[in-house]
Amino acid sequence: MIGHVEFIKSLWNMVSYDWFPIPGKIGVTLFFALSGFLITSLLLEELSVRHTVQLKKFYLRRIFRIWPLYYMVVGLSLVVFNRLDILKIPGISGQVYDHLTLTNVLILIFLLPNITHFYIPYADQR
């Protein structure tokens, strides 16, 4: 979180510091390690209880947990966040609507924003 705050401060031309001793990439690595541990433990627990793993149900549970939040954040970022003066990022927020094409919207809908350079403030991981 600290890395994100410092990044946003630099976009606002505020003084930002790289004082935090652990870079953000380590946080991402820890997140994926913990997620992998959690998902594996859930699958192993299901295997020990039911003696089988129902992957379709497992993935559907993950989808119903992740997708609503993803679409809410992307929707709010497109419709609300970029229109509030206090949340506008100079030089970036205005470009969102200039580059809002059908292709970019489809990329967002199909969860593929990393294959384009369409940047949405507050909804992107850059």
Image: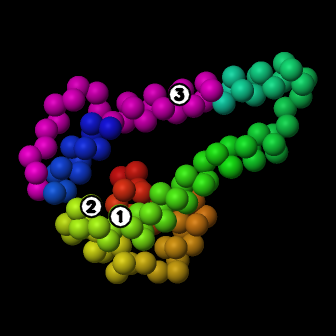
In the rendered image, is residue 119 in sight? no
Give the magenta-colored segment's residue range. Answer: 13-38
Q: Tell whether position 42 is magenta.
A: no
Mark found first going from the N terminus, 1 or 3: 3
Is label 1 in a helix, a strand or a loop? helix
Read off the residue under disc 1: 81
User: How packed is label 3: few (under 14 Cα within 10 Å), some, or many (20 or more)?
Assistant: few
Q: Nearer the viewer, residue 33 or 75?
A: 75
Tell me whether the residue at label 1 lies in contact with that at label 2, contact meaning CB atoms closer than 8 angstroms.
Answer: yes
Q: Relative to 96, does residue 7 appear above or below in the rendering?
A: above
Is label 2 in a helix, a strand or a loop? helix
Is label 3 in a helix, a strand or a loop? helix
Mark found first going from the N terminus, 3 or 2: 3
Amino acid on which disc 2 is placed: Leu
Amino acid on which disc 3 is placed: Ala
Residue 31: percent from left, percent from top: 48, 32
Horizontally, residue 41 falls left or right of residue 96, namely right
Read off the residue under disc 3: 33
Real-space CA distance between mark 1 and mark 3, rounded to the nearest whole angstrom: 31 Å
Residue drawn where x is 68% and y is 49% of the image:
63
Residue 83: percent from left, percent from top: 32, 71
- For the view shown, which residue lies furthest in the left direction? 15
Mark found first going from the N terminus, 1 or 2: 1
Q: Tell whether position 27 is magenta.
A: yes
In the rendered image, is residue 90 in sight? yes
Tell me whether the residue at label 3 lies in contact with that at label 2, contact meaning CB atoms closer than 8 angstroms.
Answer: no
Read off the residue under disc 2: 87
User: How packed is label 2: few (under 14 Cα within 10 Å), some, or many (20 or more)?
Assistant: some
